[in-house]
Amino acid sequence: MTFLIDGTFSIAPNEFTESKDPNSTFSKTIDNTRRRAIRNLKKDWEIKYNRLSLTDYRTLETIYEKFEPVSFVNSDLDINTLVHVDITDQGYLAGNSNFFSDVTVNLTEE
């Protein structure tokens, strides 16, 4: 499964997780029933790469350093939205400084 971030980055991840973040409030009715009013639902995605080349990491870093929402597309899952990008700390693979290990990209729907 491949995702397209900002129209330029499309490397298949090793792991992908989607979570939902509802903007909601709870209230109690007269008969003591609890109700939940959801105003909107935003999604968060976590994309993990076990190994990423230095070139690919720099592409991600350039997207991150825009500090503005970018496009996030996956036609298989019907995703086409704007997201904010965050990248976790990463490490170099032992003995090879041309690859990063354990890179996690967090995407938050705008």
Image (spheres, rainbow, N blue to C red):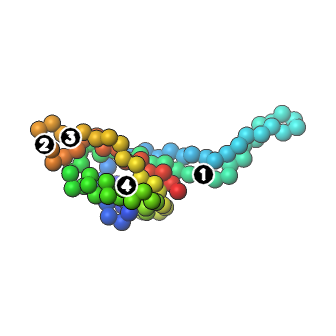
Residue 28 in sight in this render: yes
Q: Could you give the CA–CA distance between mark 3 and mark 1, rounded to whole angstroms?
A: 36 Å
- Mark drawn on residue 64: 4
Residue that sits furthest to the top in the current view: 32
The residue located at (57%, 46%) in the rendering is 21
The residue located at (49%, 61%) in the rendering is 81
Closer to the N terminus: mark 1 or mark 2? 1
The residue located at (26%, 55%) in the rendering is 58
- Foreground disc of the pair 1, 2: 2
Closer to the N terminus: mark 4 or mark 3? 4
Label 2 near label 3: C-beta < 8 Å? yes
SS class, disc 1: strand
Q: Which residue lies under the disc numbered 1?
A: 41
Label 1 near label 3: C-beta < 8 Å? no
Vertical placement of residue 15 versus 7, above or below: above
- Residue type at mark 1 is Leu
The one of 89 and 75 positioned closer to us in this rendering: 89
- Residue type at mark 4 is Tyr
User: Which quadrant holds the N terminus?
Assistant: bottom left
Q: Which residue lies under the disc numbered 3?
A: 92
Q: Could you give the CA–CA distance between mark 1 and mark 2, rounded to whole angstroms?
A: 42 Å
Label 2 near label 1: C-beta < 8 Å? no
The image shows residue 2 at horizontal and vertical percentages of 34, 57
Closer to the N terminus: mark 3 or mark 1? 1
Q: Which residue lies under the disc numbered 2?
A: 96
Q: Quadrant of residue 11?
A: bottom left
Q: Could you give the CA–CA distance between mark 3 and mark 2, rounded to whole angstroms?
A: 7 Å
Vertical placement of residue 70 versus 97, above or below: below
The reply, left or right, for residue 22 in relation to residue 28 is left
The image shows residue 78 at horizontal and vertical percentages of 47, 60
